[in-house]
Amino acid sequence: MRELIHRASRGDEEAWHELVHRHASVVWSVTRAHRLRGADAADASQNTWAALAEHLPRLRDPDRVAGWLATTARRECLRILLQGRREVPLEQIEIGTYEEPAVLRTARDKLLWQAFATLPARCRQLLGLLAHAPELTYVQLSRALGIKVNSLGQTRGRCLDVLRRRLILLGGGPE
Amino acid sequence: MKYSRGDLDLLGALAALLRRVDPVPPDVIADAMAAGLRLTSREPRLASWTLDVAWLVPE
């Protein structure tokens, strides 16, 4: 990762593309956790990447770039929300509608989606981010989602347990 | 943070599912790539650049 960051900071196009491909889902999941949609989500994402490009040469711990991106994305989401004083009605959130998407191909996909969609919002936010970046520390997760760090371990365990139990109830136990 | 093998399998399946259900839009990826390359290659910025990086970036 250090080498990748070093190359990207020197304007290496291939390295920058690799960085974006690796971590775009992390940034995107933070915008979703803050209920941004459409142009706002795109702006938050783009500004986060621009901030990383600015900050790359001074990044203190390149191995923690996913956490840096998640925290920066949250701050950008909050900035956008504060600027517009927007409150997005729950029913307007694209992913929040949780209708069964057409892209679910297998029975296993459908069961996992059903189980995930019925989780409490906090669990969806937490697992949605962890799924893309399980390497995040509790502190990074706390900063990215605004959850108290003390409760994160317990919350993470509970959310995973609930998801697993709902999967089993729906008939989709461990493979 | 420690995970069991089962946790990682479940999170991996969820990540694959979310990438299909709510993918990062291609134009967002393209913008991220373009913005990053412009800044890392030290091209001149637009006068309208207003992002408060000092406020944004983590300590």
Image: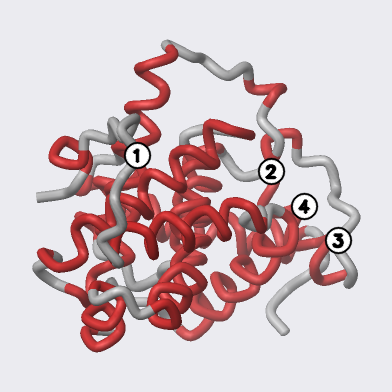
| Residue identified by numbered label 1 | B46
- Where in the figure is residue A34, as x and y percent of width and height? 47, 34
How far apart marks 4 and 1 lie (CA) works out to 45 Å
Q: Residue A56: which quarter of the image?
A: bottom left
Residue toward you, A89 or A174: A89
Q: Residues within 10 Å of mark 3 (few under 14, many from 20)?
A: few
> Which of labels 1 and 3 is toward the front?
1
Identify the amino acid type marked 4: Gln
Q: Position of residue B11 (x, y in %)?
A: 54, 70
First reached walking from the N terminus: tag 2 or tag 3? 3
Amino acid at dot 3: Val
According to the picture, the residue beneath numbered tag 2 turns out to be A118
Q: Which residue is mark 3?
A: A103
Alpha carbon of mark 2 to alpha carbon of mark 3: how far?
18 Å
Query: Is residue A103 visible in the rendered structure shown here?
Result: yes
Could you give the CA–CA distance between mark 4 and mark 3, rounded to whole angstroms? Answer: 13 Å
- The quadrant of the rendering that contains the N terminus of chain A is bottom left
Q: Which residue lies under the disc numbered 4?
A: A114
| Residues packed near mark 4 inside 10 Å, few (<14), some (14 to 19) or many (20 plus) | some
Badges 4 and 1, same chain: no
Badge 1 vs badge 3, beta-carbon distance below 8 Å: no
